[in-house]
Image (cartoon, helix red, strand yellow):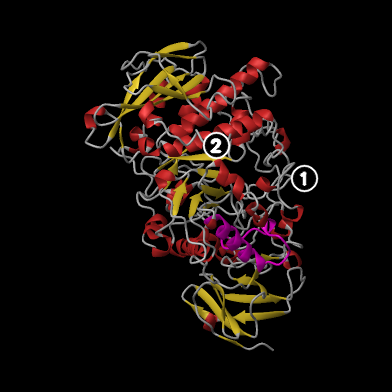
Amino acid sequence: MTPTCLGRPGPLGAQVCGDGVNFAVVAPRATHVELLFFDHGSSPVPSRIVHLGPAHRSGDVWHVFVNGVGLGCRYGYRVHGAQEAGFNPAKVLLDPCARAVDGWQVYERQASLGKGSNLDCCLKGVVTEREPFDFTAAPRPRRPWRDTVIYELHPGGFTRGRGAPVPPEERGTLLGLRHLLPYLKSLGVTAIELLPVQCFDPGSAPAGLHNYWGYAPVNWFSLHPGYVAGQDPLQARQQMRAFVAACHQDNLEVFVDVVYNHTAEGGGDGPTVSWRGFAEQLYYFCDGSGRYQDVTGCGNTVAANRPHVRHLILESLRCWAVELGVDGFRFDLAAALTRGDNLTPLKEAPLFRAMAADPFLADLKLTGEPWDCGGLYRLADFPAQEFGVWNGRFRDDVRRFWKGDQNTCWNMRQRLSGNRDLFAAADVKSGRSIHFVTAHDGFTLQDLVSYNIKHNLANGESNRDGENHNNSWNCGVEGPSSDESVQALRCRQVRNLITSLLLAPGVPLLWMGDEVNRSQGGNNNSWCQDNSVGWMTWDHGPSEQAMGRYVRRLLRLRTALGSWLNPSTLIQEQAEAKPLQAYRKWHGPRLNRPDYGPWSHALAWSLHTATGDVVLWCGLNAFHESIQFDLPRCRNGWRRYVDTALPAGDDLPGSSSPWSRDRVLLESHSLVLMVAGRHCPAVLEADPG
């Protein structure tokens, strides 16, 4: 029999120590804990059970050291205590700190419901190493926020789709994703943001479908097995490291979308997989009668304000950052993590204060959604100044302007000039505002200009799911159209939207496939569509290739003009300008006469040096008729770099041409960018297209 001793209360989880493993788990109100060992992931019964009594308890932590076991050991827990406290010893529980998970070949979500046993179909933790990432061989790129362009993608869906240049056996995996790094690097993005890769429950979806996006975590420390090539759970961490190392060597940063605001255990009638069975009323917000309180829309809300929960989240972040090499995190529904007991919003969130003080997280890029499903929206007062926040106002205002809505010019001016109205600061900190027009949640860019309403029937919820207020415009026809005028208008609108995004000061985020007109057929909530709807498209026709060329050139132009577009050097008003600083002027069709009336659909801006020399001019016409715009006088002459009304290839040509006139005609629904001759970047001249 394998001998045991009391062990240590930390670190939490399973840690190899010499000729054995130390196990430690938090269960404050438990009276007895059983540690179960299994021969392999599909074992229907444990090979051994170790009983932990009062002597194995230090405070709220239960612990034991077991000799003769090591890497690859499969294990789980059964926890005893009062039924009214939520304990059910019939359930085998996954260690919340397990760094690998096995048992997927027998796991049944249904068996984790109710009071019955799940012994023969439970998930098991796997003992792994805890080695740090090799930053000497693959150092972090450490790219400044001002130079960052984020590309959000699904780690499985990006490697699938017809024509994907990935070996068949690696499609859907992180190893497969490595083959596509040259594509992303050539596009011009600098950071890859992965949809959730932490282990999640695919079974939390309607019958016949599965959770594709991964916003249903069952463990915060382990890589989801669906993204691992092969069946060995010990390879998961190595493959994640290999992917991150390949990105670092290509000077690409890796961000991970993390879900700490809720879990796959759902509401009070949900499955008991892990956290619920150890300490239901510790990990989740509950009212006085034990009913779950929820602001995530997923049945439960994690109580991140509590010390044990906060510690667990911080340990998870360190695992991904220090052990696996990740460069940053995007926090799903981050506002929910700022709530205290009874879901009261906290002015200073304990979790974010702890993150700011943690030296292991100090060099990471952190961003979050500043809202939750309970109505909290903390864009201006997000309680962590070092955080970047997803700027939903940017998305909405840019969409409404190009859609042609009334009362949009003033808001469009604010979005294109640094969002000082939202953040109440003279200079918005670089990296504070993450700009996007589209993301995983909502229409793709092509669908945004092709559909007025969502088409989500394939999701199995009678089209009830997904956002109803999309600020989209189908350009006259719902869905695909063979009408050339509709196609041309959509082409312009797509370019207008993405150009507005990439010329605005802030950190832009692009959604997977928008650069090649990827469509989801009008589905604006593809969370359960692990098929061609949710996959990247790789079979590109002429229009898709033209769009890709436009985005590549636009990103190169943005980089070349970065010193002028950078919010850290750009002053928004001439009166505020100091030596060596640029300032912005606002115009309408006539110089220095912007029109912010509800009827206006035309806006222009220009950038000037401190000595008054003009550098850039950009005109935006969201009206249904063409408009003549006056150009500022330019000593060195203008060059037209962008005109979204021109045919593909001419809209952002590889070689710009001089412009001798003092006016420019903007066709309906078009954008034009002019660059002063002496400031023209040569980067596009060498672009082979």
**Mark nearer the N terminus (2 vs 1):** 1
From this view, report whether residue 636 is shown above or below residue 384.
above
**Image spot of residue 82 (x, y percent):** 58, 68
Task: Indicate which disc residue 552 carries.
Answer: 2
Q: Which residues are magenta?
A: 220-248
From this view, report whether residue 588 is shown above or below residue 462.
above
Q: Is residue 79 visible?
A: yes
Q: Nearer the viewer, mark 2 or mark 1?
A: 2
Crowdedness of circle 2 by 10 Å Cα count: few (<14), some, many (20+)?
many
- Residue 224 among those drawn in magenta: yes
Q: Are marks 2 and 1 in contact (CB under 8 Å)?
A: no
Q: Which quarter of the figure is the N terminus placed in?
A: bottom right
Q: Please, what is the three-letter code of the amino acid marked with disc 2? A: Arg
**Image spot of residue 324 (x, y percent):** 54, 63
| Residue at (60, 75) in percent of width and height | 33
Viewer-proximal residue among 352 and 445: 445
**Image spot of residue 66 (x, y percent):** 61, 83
- Residue 339 among those drawn in magenta: no
Q: What is the secondary structure assignment of the residue under circle 1? A: loop
Viewer-proximal residue among 542 and 120: 542
Q: Which quarter of the figure is the C terminus placed in?
A: top right
Q: What is the secondary structure assignment of the residue under circle 2? A: helix
Task: Indicate which disc residue 75 carries.
Answer: none
Crowdedness of circle 1 by 10 Å Cα count: few (<14), some, many (20+)?
few
Viewer-proximal residue among 77 and 467: 467
| Residue at (69, 66) in percent of width and height | 102
From this view, report whether residue 374 is shown above or below residue 664.
below
Quote the CA–CA distance across marks 2 and 1: 39 Å
Q: Which residue is mark 1?
A: 208
Q: Please, what is the three-letter code of the amino acid marked with disc 1? A: Gly
